[in-house]
Amino acid sequence: MMAPVLTPARLAFLAAVAAVVAPFAAGTTLGAIRFLSNDAGPLAITLIRLGIGAAILLPMALVFARGWPRGRDFWVLVGIGVVMFGFSQWMVSASLSYTSAARGGIIASTVPFMTLAVSAALRAEQLTWLKALGVSVSTGGVVLALWQDASAIPGGWRGDLLMLAASAVLSIYNVVSRHRARKYPPLIFVVCNMVPGVLVLAAIAAASGVTPGDIPLTRENLLAIAYIGVIGSAFTYFLWLWALRHTTPSRVAIGLTMNPMGAMAAGAVILGEPITLGVWAGLGCIAGGILLANWRLQDRKAETRTHDG
């Protein structure tokens, strides 16, 4: 029996689903990272998270994937991998040493607005009123949820700024990497990004005397480590880049507004972080923005121009 052929509209729909599932999973990872931050520093946590992801994906890519980048493309992927999968994820882990998982997830949801701004400025995709309205509603929900968040930590502004900086890097990455993400299979692309980031972080850790093995191997810590490595790294990044390959940057980025939902769920269950009614109202706006931005997935004219361009 032949496998069903996926039409562009069906691929766009599946990519929209993937762009929602991946950030939700990443959001739950913030809770596990916050949990581990009591026993380990940001560099060690990031190295463990990305190291496990690379250990899972690299052998799969070597065995199953074909069409590896060469020449200039290879070095471009290495460069953006060091920035995105190295320093940016280090900032994410560092931010959670200062702020709560819920608040970190809310701030990460500023990515859709920044991605849309970068994408429009670089003319990477057509800006429609529906996309702009969806991002605006979601961003308004982020502001409302952040304002009503009861889990703020004294001095947590440092973590807020670090998460905002990491979100800015991700926004730029969404746009500048998309062209090359479509040239190569997602498995190859994520490995070419992730492995250089891991190697740079490993070199920094060795130079600074940071040893991930110093983390107490309690049952809870082992579960958290396994979760951030398998779900928060290998699964999330592969699914995210697959979505980026098959739809537009802003529609992928709008899925990041699911990040605080995952973060708040994990924060409430794992860390006992409070969730107020105002936060739920903000999350309702975020969900509404997602629906608006993805309402016309059959907008073939805009999609065709983007895919062919």
Image: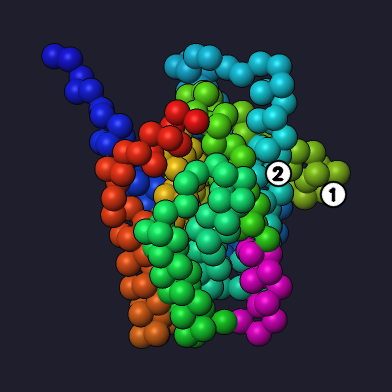
Image x and y of residue 248, in percent: 45, 43
What secondary structure is the stretch in magenta mostly built from? Answer: helix
Q: Residue at x 68, y 64 (%)?
A: 162
Quarter of the image containing the N terminus? Answer: top left
Q: Residue at x 50, y 58 (%)?
A: 112
Figure check: 30 above or below 186: below
The stretch drawn in magenta includes residue 163: yes
Q: Confirm whether residue 267 shows in the render.
A: no
The residue wearing badge 1 is 208
The residue wearing badge 2 is 83
- Circle 2: is it few (<14), some (14-19), or many (20+) Cα within 10 Å? many
Figure check: 120 above or below 177: below
Q: Residue at x 57, y 44 (%)?
A: 123
Q: How is the image coloured?
A: rainbow
Figure check: 42 above or below 142: above
Image x and y of residue 105, in percent: 51, 65
Write the start and end of the magenta stretch as one range.
Answer: 153-164
Q: Nearer the viewer, residue 93 or 10?
A: 10
Taking the image as shown, residue 78 lies to the left or right of residue 308, namely: right
